[in-house]
Amino acid sequence: MHEVTGDVRSGVDLSRFRDEYPWDSEWFDRGSSKMHYLDEGEGDPVVFVHGNPTWSFYWRRLVKELAGDHRCVVPDHIGMGLSDKPLDADYDYTLKSRVDDLEALLEHLGITERITLVLHDWGGMIGLAFAQRHPERIARLVLMNTAGFFLPEGRGLPWQLWLIKNLPFALPVRGLNAFVVGALHTCSTRPGRMTAPIKAGYAAPYDSWGHRIAVHRFVQDIPLAPGHPAFDVVDAVHKNLDQWRGTPVQIFWGEKDFVFDMHFLAEWRRRLPDAEYHQFPDCGHYILEDAHEEIVPRLRAFLAAHPLPAPE
């Protein structure tokens, strides 16, 4: 176990963020790479899956709130956060690999039932693809500004993502850190929430060209047509989303998200009309930065309203 104050594998000095991120690091060996994760608390498991370009830091407030009576498991995807950041030759940066990693980690930890998944951004597709493999393991779903389907009708890929996905050079993302920095300036929309220390926490793992490889590969892995490596995985989730109509689902939505915008929320409402919805008109993509004080009690109430049966 590695002290959070001096993370030796990632090279990130977390002593600056001790108050925000006070936990010990755990590591899971995935062969050529080590996957970083948090494993805090006891009780029924709540598994948090982040997207791009965040890391387990995004979930810190929910872990602090829930670890008193739940087992909170919070991985960093390979190439993200405090996990190793291998070259393409050593890791396949695809959606399938992300799902395989999550599956392997949870099996390694013996978490094979009664799972509540809490998903954000591209973590939604990763978590839902895992859930489709093992629907019997999933007890509840909590979704935040994410997708479980292809681009909704009438919604194209935002121009910012199109440029990153299609430009033949990586300088903006990997040299200038434009994706991480841009997100820090646009994804939290309530004034005063994204302070300088919080921005530093988000950006800390992405401090060099080599450490930004997964940020770039995540955008390139968005499938827009058949033949793309991620297309079949997304297609399967897209076609089978109705299977969750009988599962307790809670959805939080920041309406000022310019990527996962209101077209996506409308599609969720169409696909899962019985889910519990909470909309925040003045919040952005990083909804937990903008509205954690309102989300925490509503999440608590949702878990209490859908208790799990006593384990056999």
Image (cartoon, rainbow, N blue to C red):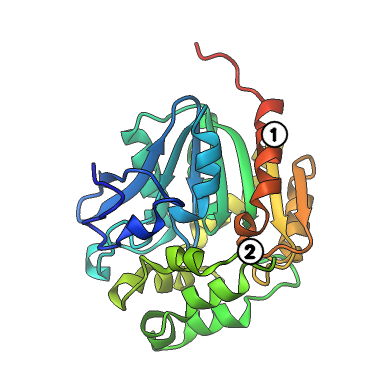
Q: Nearer the viewer, residue 308 or 205?
A: 205
Residue at x 74% of width, y 68% of height: 153
Residue type at mark 1: give it: Phe
> Mark 2 falls on what kind of element?
loop
**Which amino acid type is marked by label 2?**
His
Secondary structure beneath disc 1? helix
Tell me how far mark 2 sits from mark 1, CA to CA.
21 Å
Q: Which residue is mark 1?
A: 302
Q: Up-down: is 40 above or below 289?
A: above
Question: How many residues crowd mark 2 within 10 Å: few (<14), some (14–19), many (20+)?
Answer: many
In this rendering, would 92 be left or right of 302? left
Please tell me which residue is depicted at 31% across the width and 78% down the height of the picture. 209
Q: Mark on residue 285?
A: 2
Q: Which mark is residue 217?
A: none
Q: Dividing the image into 4 quarters, which one contains the N terminus?
A: top left
> Quadrant of residue 225 in the image?
bottom right
Total numbered badges shown on the rendered structure: 2
Residue 189 image-quadrant placement? bottom right
Q: Residue at x 63, y 53 (%)?
A: 144
Looking at the image, which is closer to me, 234 or 117?
A: 117
Is residue 131 visible from the viewing direction of this image? no
Q: For the point 76% across and 48% down, which residue is it?
A: 278
The image shows residue 233 at horizontal and vertical percentages of 50, 55
Q: Nearer the viewer, residue 23 or 83?
A: 23
In this view, which residue lies farthest toward the top?
A: 312
Rendering coords of residue 118 (x, y %): 56, 44
Question: Is residue 137 in sight in this rendering?
Answer: yes
